Image (cartoon, rainbow, N blue to C red):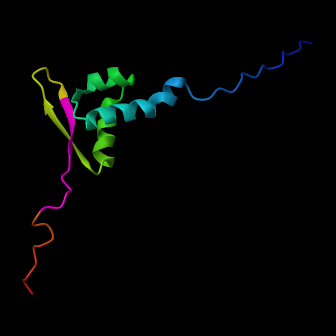
Amino acid sequence: MKTRKAAVAAPMQSKDTKELRLPQLKSMVLQMMKEGQRFTAKEINRIAGFNDARKFISDLRRHLSDYLVRDTRLNTGCKLYWLEPINTKPTLFSGQEDAGHE
């Protein structure tokens, strides 16, 4: 009769170090974009070390409330992405549309 070897339990490992660093890398790219830098998707992938820059840009478009994600197509066919702050500062005439018209 053959005896089976006991299964050796592999030590539980937490997430891969790359996956752990992903939020930090994304926040680094976001901060660089907030500072006015412009990037193509290839450059974002190279800097952050991941392969989903276009998904990252889509997420920014959905979740950033104080910036607009702008883009333009370059002669090479790549798109260049940057952030543009939304002007939410009050102006001299803001909130006065109905003043004096009762």
- Please identify the quadrant where the N terminus is shown: top right
Image location (x, y in percent) of residue 26: 38, 33
Q: Residue furthest top?
A: 2
The residue located at (39%, 22%) in the rendering is 49
Q: State left or right for residue 60 relative to residue 93.
A: right
- Whether residue 56 appears in magenta in the rendering, the answer is no
Does 47 appear above or below 85?
above
The residue located at (85%, 16%) in the rendering is 4
Image location (x, y in percent) of residue 32: 29, 32
Does 49 appear above or below 26?
above
Image location (x, y in percent) of residue 65: 29, 51
The residue located at (27%, 34%) in the rendering is 33
- Whether residue 83 appears in magenta in the rendering, the answer is yes
- Please identify the quadrant where the C terminus is shown: bottom left
Q: State left or right for residue 12 relative to residue 89.
A: right
Q: Nearer the viewer, residue 59 or 31?
A: 31
Q: Nearer the viewer, residue 37 or 80?
A: 37
Q: In the figure, residue 38 lies in which quadrant? A: top left
Magenta span: 80-91
Q: Residue furthest right?
A: 1
Q: Nearer the viewer, residue 72 or 30?
A: 30
The residue located at (31%, 42%) in the rendering is 60
Q: In the figure, residue 58 lies in which quadrant? A: top left
Q: Residue furthest left?
A: 101
Q: In the figure, residue 59 lies in which quadrant? A: top left
Image location (x, y in percent) of residue 56: 34, 35
